[in-house]
Image (cartoon, rainbow, N blue to C red):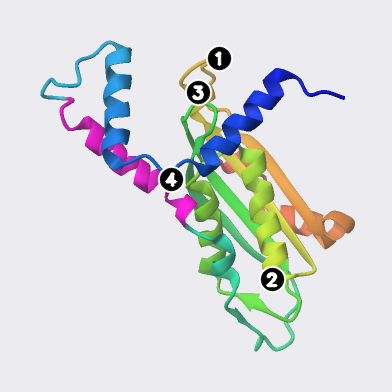
């Protein structure tokens, strides 16, 4: 069966983007000037003269996750836990990400739990995994799955649970303009998927996500 020209073209663009060298800082700043002109303003006026530099610096911060390997944060583990094999949960991990469709902010919290299998990891490393994936262009569902799979792959626990609740400014500041709306997604692996009691315990520990979310 032959592929449609549109699908073939999209794949070609994706391959090209992956192999092309990264644009220079000067090229990035010039792209911002182009957008400012397209928006109807003058990038040479006093208030905007340094905006391209500021935007480029902000992008380096917002999207620093592309330079990080989340799996590396989980490589150092501890086995001296006196046989502890019950649930470990780190909840209310605040994050800031950006929607890959509109570049609008996604602001929310992640709740991460796992059932250790003879080894545990420092709790700050779980937060770093969330941060590494959040500081990329994202779709919440994809980010949710990435965090869960990363923890499962490296720690090899009996199960992993990740719940994310977030407000999407691509929905609150444009389009339908619906304020006070949060999106909740979840990924349950291993025992959290197979055992309803384990899953229920995790959800009980993190509480009702929508009821305590304030953006």
In the depicted view, which residue is nearer to us: 72 or 6? Answer: 6
Q: Secondary structure at mark 1?
A: loop
**Residue furthest front in the image:** 2
Residues at marks 1 and 2 touching, judged by CB atoms closer than 8 Å: no
Q: Look at 29% across and 41% down and name the residue there.
A: 25
Q: Which residue is mark 3?
A: 172
Mark 3 or mark 2, earlier in chain:
2
27 above or below 126?
above
Q: Tag on residue 63? A: 4
> Mark 3 to mark 2: distance in Å?
37 Å
Q: Is residue 58 visible?
A: yes
Q: Is residue 125 left or right of residue 3?
A: left
Location of residue 211 in the rendering, given as x and y in whole percent from the top left corner: 62, 39
> Mark 1 to mark 2: distance in Å?
41 Å
Mark 1 or mark 2, earlier in chain:
2
Check disc 3: other Cα within 10 Å, few if <14, some if 14-19, many if 20+.
some
In the depicted view, which residue is nearer to us: 34 or 121? Answer: 34
Location of residue 131 in the rendering, given as x and y in whole percent from the top left corner: 50, 54
Does the magenta stretch mainly form a helix, a strand or a loop? Answer: helix
The residue range painted magenta reads 48-67
Location of residue 197 in the rendering, given as x and y in whole percent from the top left corner: 86, 59
Residues at marks 2 and 4 touching, judged by CB atoms closer than 8 Å: no
Mark 4 or mark 1, earlier in chain:
4
Q: Which residue is mark 2?
A: 155
Q: Which residue is mark 1?
A: 176
Q: Look at 56% across and 61% down and name the residue there.
A: 70
Q: Is residue 179 visible?
A: no
Eye-nearest disc, 3 or 4? 4
């Amino acid at each position: 069966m032959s592929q449609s020209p549109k699908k073939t073209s999209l794949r070609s663009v994706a391959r090209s983007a992956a192999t092309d060298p990264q644009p220079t800082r000067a090229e990035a700043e010039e792209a911002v000037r182009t957008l400012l002109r397209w928006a109807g303003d003058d990038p040479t006026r006093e208030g905007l003269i340094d905006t391209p530099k500021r935007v480029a610096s902000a992008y380096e911060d917002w999207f620093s996750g592309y330079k990080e390997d989340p799996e590396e944060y989980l490589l150092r583990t501890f086995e001296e836990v006196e046989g502890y094999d019950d649930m470990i949960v780190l909840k209310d991990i605040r994050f800031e990400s950006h929607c890959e469709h509109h570049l609008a902010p996604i602001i929310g919290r992640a709740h991460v739990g796992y059932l250790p299998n003879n080894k545990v990891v420092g709790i700050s490393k779980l937060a770093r995994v969330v941060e590494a994936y959040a500081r990329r262009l994202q779709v919440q569902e994809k980010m949710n799955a990435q965090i869960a799979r990363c923890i499962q792959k490296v720690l090899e626990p009996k199960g992993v649970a990740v719940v994310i609740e977030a407000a999407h400014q691509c929905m609150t500041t444009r389009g339908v303009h619906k304020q006070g709306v949060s999106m909740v997604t979840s990924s349950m692996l291993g025992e959290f998927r197979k055992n309803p009691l384990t899953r229920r315990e995790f959800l009980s520990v993190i509480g009702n996500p929508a009821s305590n979310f304030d953006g």
